[in-house]
Amino acid sequence: MRHLRMFMGVAFLLLAAITNASAQHVRSRVDVNTLTPDALRAYRTWEAFLGTRIGKFSSVAGMPSALWSAAEQRRWPIYELAGFSLRDDAVPEILAIDPVGDSFRITTAFRVSAPPPVPWWTDVTMTVYAEREGGTWKLANALVPNTQRWRRDTVGAITYVYAPDCPYNHARARRAVAFTDSLALAFGAPSLAPLTHFLLLDVDAVYRVLGLESTLSFGATGGLAQPVNR
């Protein structure tokens, strides 16, 4: 028992040292003295996670982490769905942490000092969630809570997930699946593996549903694909 207490004490000091080292590289506007114990634990979890990503956000968006939801890491190879779109040289500043039901929504700004090719990236905010998992707090993407009340329609290998204000045509969905099947047959390729297609009105809405927002917008054009995550 004595050795166990010593081990636990050393482990606690090591975790505190790691957290403090990470905090030195992460800016914050949050007054931690005003947070509840649960909010503070959730906040520290995100702060520690950011500390492991400084200078390499996009390039390590699939690197395993004990701080992130294990279920999401199993579901998506590049499980940081929003982080995958961040610039590696972005500097994070935690803006707010707010309770949402039994979870916490954490908002962080990511800014770059050098002018990027696309001005959109000069001032980006990202939202993640902290949820209870296995008796502790783990991080999770904004995609699931942002789309949990959306409609779904599975046609063949494609599951269409669409916002309430987004037009959806089941007949056209069937034709799209039939077209992919015909291509596979014509070229002797494997049939389409299951994938999820989120339908929104423009690419800005796509980024928002992932948890990314900017003061600028791309407008009603384009889309976003993450093939590795299907």
Image: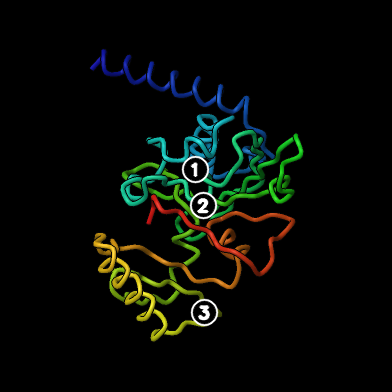
> Mark 3 highlights which residue?
164
- Mark 3 to mark 1: distance in Å? 31 Å
> Mark 2 highlights which residue?
104
Of tags 3 and 1, the one toward the viewer is 3
Badge 3: few (under 14), some or many (20 or more) residues near its Cα, within 10 Å? few
- Mark 2 to mark 1: distance in Å? 7 Å
Residue 58 is situated, as x and y percent measured from the top left of the image, at 53, 39
Residue 127 is situated, as x and y percent measured from the top left of the image, at 57, 52
Q: Is residue 220 left or right of residue 174?
A: right
Q: Amino acid at mark 2?
A: Phe
In the rendered image, which quarter contains the C terminus?
bottom left
| SS type, badge 1 | helix
| SS type, badge 3 | loop
Q: Tag on residue 142? A: none
- Considering depth in this image, is 180 or 31 the residue closer to the camera? 180
Q: Amino acid at mark 3?
A: Pro
Q: Amino acid at mark 1?
A: Ala
Q: Tag on residue 42? A: 1
Residue under the image location 44 percent in, 18 percent down: 13
